[in-house]
Structure formats: structure tokens, C-alpha cells
Image (spheres, rainbow, N blue to C red):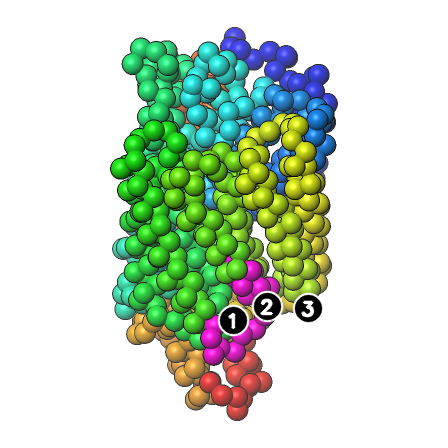
Amino acid sequence: MFGKLTWQAIPWDQPIPLVAGSVVVLIVLAILALVVLKGYLPYLWHEWITSVDHKRIGVMYTLLGLVMLLRGFIDAIMMRSQQAAAFRAAGYLPPEHYAQIFSAHGTIMIFFAAMPIMIGLMNFAVPLQLGVRDVAFPTLNSTSFWLTATGALLVNISLVVGEFARTGWLVYPPLSELPYSPGVGVDYYLWALLISGVGTLMTGINFVTTILKIRAPGMSYLRMTIFCWTALAANLLIVAAFPILTATLGMLALDRYLGFHFFTNEAGGNMMMFINLIWAWGHPEVYILVLPAFGIFSEVISTFSGKPLFNYRSMVAATMFICLVSYMVWLHHFFTMGAGADVNAFFGISTSIIAVGTGVKIYNWLFTMYGGRIRFTTPMLWSMGFLVTFVIGGMTGVLLAVPPADFLLHNSLFLVAHFHNVIIGGVLFAAFAGITYWFPKAFGFKLDEGWGKAGFWLSLLGFYVVFMPLYVAGLLGMTRRLQHYDVAAWRPWVLVAGIGIIIMMAAAACQVAQFVVSIRRREELRDETGDPWNGRSLEWATTSPPPPFNLAVLPNVQGAEPYWEIKRRAIETQHLSPEPNYEPIEMPRNSPTGFITAFFSTITGFALIWHIWWLVGLGLVAAYAVFVWFAWRDAVEYSIPAEEVARYDRERRRAREQWLAQHAGQPA
């Protein structure tokens, strides 16, 4: 009745996952009990779980990403400490557990930490910057989030029920095929990514449609912020790349479940085709993460330099250049596969060329800062740390783009250090900059600067202490994924990296403290004006936090920085623009469709992993029934009365008038 699922699926003989899983289950149960006993459940259901408001979905995406970032960081701590202890010794993690940890670490950090944070920040900021009320398909947006949460949940269930893949984060065959991985680990990986991948693809469709078709009056493409441009490029890549991932993992699932031979050793299978396909998705995925990060840095550097972004049009051109060329470089991930010198040369050259687009951006950011009145706030510090760190990572990437060098360094810790150099230095630094930058817009109060700066400096120091030694260890020949090692020359570098992870733990503690202290001091840190950073784009034109409809009246955009022009005019004249004529606003109704669909998707995914076929059928029928029910809804929108719209906007205007009175006589 329960397929392959038995009591033996729980790791009774492995204390680490058993204790860790028990602690997580107890924490979740305690939170649920607190929510129910305090009476928060109706509020959470109506205002968050069923919300289709892009801002709340963005916050939930970001929160999911931060929780999974902590989960993936725990895996990183275990790997660093295992290698520090495993010189000519077994360490404390058995090989099969260590293999699951490095596989889960990569999977979680890319798919369920970095991706949700970037998508969350896009969800929150892009409609506000476009001057519109919501995304094109609000209910689809909610469904996308909950399907992503389903994938994250399935990965975490594998911690205590069964096992996770032991194949690395990209499940290369033949190791991932049934004869070599007969357990459920690869199946957990497949269904978590297939389900969450559908959610990500729907996000891509949603944002491409929103940016191309829904913008404020007068907002042409070349009046959009660079963050909107990078969001457009990233989502175009999602629409083009994620079907490749879904098809590739679908073929591997057919191999494992129905005995097909797409990637097997026999019967015409070709395992190298899997590697081609997975990296045809995988390298655009790097830019799906990095391009929105570039957009965040563009917003932050412009705001805190007090200047428009230098050479805006070249930034747009560089963004779309990277978007296009990112599809012409995937083979550099496997120069050693034997495609031949001509093929390797082509992809090596294209990989070097794509660095030109990033170089243009680096110089534009530097020239934006040049001559500016720079304010060294926490978001700006993350941005400046990025400029140094990412350049180093980019140069090591260009080195790896040279096929003869790659033959020596492939699968070494040099490659691991390079990858973390660009993802941590680019994506993670951008995530922290973006969260700190937009937090007051989302919640109405700023994050504490003292704890934020402490977190930044410790993160920067910890990053260099962890990964610079790994470059050296890689050059000395140390390969990735070693559960233990015997070479004495590697030992000092591994120990220094272990010290670095302790520094990064201190950084993480500072960032947690930043949130706790900020929430406790929120009245002192309150943002009354809606513009705490003296911002330049339209999200700062509304209140903090914004009302459900974002803006009382859609702006008529007449320049590249419409909000900056409105603000400058108000400072010069010491008067706000005349009060507009308020009208009722129609907004989409909240819908439980996404949550219910994800609930049944979780059941279906779990049943597919454990071969509980009757539950698979039940889950699919129930999920289909939810879509039918959604299609037959009568009321899809509700109207916000003009009086309520006026009340929101008059409060905003009153705060802005007080600010003008306090800053009378200051230059615009």
C-alpha cells in the first residue's frame, strides 16, 4: 500500500540526520502551535498564504530563500569541518552522508536559496518601479511561489525520510541511473526540481509579460530602471532555459521509472548528452542569478552616489548582450569531455567575450561613483565589496575559459573557489544589499546599520579566508568532494578555510541580530516619508509599506528618472503637485489556488518518490480539480473605494509636506 516506504526509511542508525531532523520538526510544530494559540492563523491565511499581492509574494519568496540559505550554510559548515578533521582520518561524517551533504548543499543554495531571493526581490520591486499595480498574472504568481516551496519541502523531507542524492548537485549519469543509485535520493532530487521548475517557468512567463506589456503611461523601454532591464533579461533566460532542465530531468526520470535508455551505458543511451543538456540550462542559470544582482547594484550605487547611472544605454546593451551570449558558452563546463580542439576553442573564445559585457558594467558603476557624494550605508558597502570580489572571480573565470588551463584545473578546488567567488561575491552580496535597501519599503522601518555593517565586514573577511586558500589547494591538485585526504601539502589551506567558515558563522549571527534588533527598535527606525534613502526610482514615490494598489494614481512618466524629477520640482517650489482626482481601483482577489495546488503537488511528488501509485492518482486528480474550480470563479476582482484611496494618499502627502517644511531652503 505504501510502495517502498517503510519504517527503515528513517535513519535510526545515523544520529546526525536523526537529531537534526527531530529538531527541525519540533521547531516547525512549535511555530504552528504558537500561530494557532495566538490566533494568528486567520491573519496569515487571508493576508499572506492566499495573497496574490506581488509585494507579499516577494517577501515570502525572500523569506523562503533566507531560511534555505541558512540550511545550505549548515551543510557548508559540516563540509568544511569534516575536511579539517579528515586528514589521514575518517572524520565524523561517513562517506555516504558526506556525499548527500555536498549534493544537498549545491541543490539548496542554487535552486532554493539564491533563486527565491532574486525572484522575491524582482517580485517586490519591479511592478513598483514600472509604476503599475501588480504583475500580469497575480494568481499564477502565487502558484509559482508555492510550487517552489513544495520543491524546498521535498528536499528537506529527504533529511529524515529516506536519503538525498549522492551524485553531486547535477546528478550526472551513469551514477544517477538506477543500477548505481537504487535508493530514493535521486528521485527526491528529480521531483523537487521538476515541480519547482514548473513554478520558476511560470514566474518567467509572468515577468516577461509584465515588463513588455504593463508599464505606467509614458514609460518606454529606455525609461525603465536597469533593475527592470536585468529582470527582463533574466526572465527571458528562464523562459528559454527551464524547459531544457524539465525535459532533461524528465528523461532521466523515464530512465529510472520505466527503463528507458536516454542516458544509460547500454541500448543506445548517451550519458554525455545529459551533460550537454544540463549545462545548456546550467550556464544561462548562472546569468539568471547574476543579472538581477547587477540590477540591484545599479540601483544601490546610483542612489548612494547621488547621481544617475553612468551611460545608461550601454548598461542596457551590456545586459542584453550577456543575455544572448550566455547561450553560447555552456561547453566550457566540460572541455575535458573530448569534443575536440575546434569546439573547445569556439566556446573558450565565447566565454572570454561574455566577460566584456560585465566589464562594461563594472566601469559604468565606477564612473557612477566618480564625482558622486557617496554615502557608505550597508547596501553601498555590499556593492563595493562586490566590485572587488566579483572582478577577482571574473578573472579566474577567464583563466578557466582557456581549455589547456581548464584541463589542469577541471574538478579541482580552484573551480569550486571560482564558482563561489562569483556566486557569493555577486548574487549573495546583491541579495543582502537588496534586502537592506528595500526592507524599509516593505515593512516601514530601516534595518539597523551597526549590525548590518558588522555583518558585511565579517562576511567579506570570512569569504576571503575560506575561498582564497581553496584556490591554492586547487592549484596544488586537490579535487572537489573529498571526504578525506592524505596529502600533507593540502592540510594548511584546508585548515585556514575552516577558520574562515567560523568567521562566516559570526557574520551570519550578526545578520540575524540585525533583524532582531531592528524589529525591537522599529519605532526609532520608522520611515515616515516612504523615501528613506533619497531614492531616484518610482518605488520611493509611495508609502512604506505601500498600499495594496501601490500608487493612488499611475504616474505619467516623462523622463528616465521620473520620481527624481518630481522630487526635485517639489523641493524647488516647496510645494507638492496638486492633489489628483481619486477614483476607485480594481484589484485581484486573493486566491488559495496556489497553496492548494502546491499541497497536492507535495503529496504527488512524495508518492512518486516512494512509488505509492494510488496516492499519485489521488494527488493529480485533486490538483486538476483545483484548477477547474479556479476557472469557474465568478468574482475575480474587488474594488477599493475612492475614499480609501484618497485616505492612503493624503497620509503620504502629509508626510511629504512635513519633510519639505523641515528641509526648506536646501538645494534640490
Closer mark to the observer between disc 2 and disc 3: 2
Q: CB atoms at circles 1 and 3 under 8 Å apart? A: no
**Mark 2: few/some/many CA within 10 Å (<14, 14-19, 20+):** some
Residue in view at x 59 percent, y 40 percent: 473
Disc 2 from disc 1: Cα separation: 8 Å
Q: Residue furthest bottom?
A: 665
Q: Disc 1 residue type?
A: Phe
In percent of width and height, residue 303 lies at 48, 70
Is residue 393 at all visible to an observer of this figure? yes
Mark 3: which amino acid? Glu
N-terminal of the two: label 2 or label 3? Answer: 2
Report whether 146 appears left or right of 88.
left
Stretch of the chain drawn in magenta:
369-386
Assign a secondary structure to mark 3: loop
- Give whichever of discs 1 and 3 has the lower sequence position: 1
Q: Residues within 10 Å of mark 3 (few under 14, many from 20)?
A: few
How many tags in the picture? 3
Image position, residue 353 (x, y; %): 32, 52
Nearer-the-camera pick, 552 or 410: 410
Task: Using the image as rendered, state which of residue 637 and residue 252 is in the foreground.
Answer: 252
Q: Which residue is mark 2?
A: 377
Say which residue label 1 marks.
304
Q: Quick check: 589 above or below 406?
A: below
Residue named by callout 3: 524
Front position among marks 1 and 3? 1
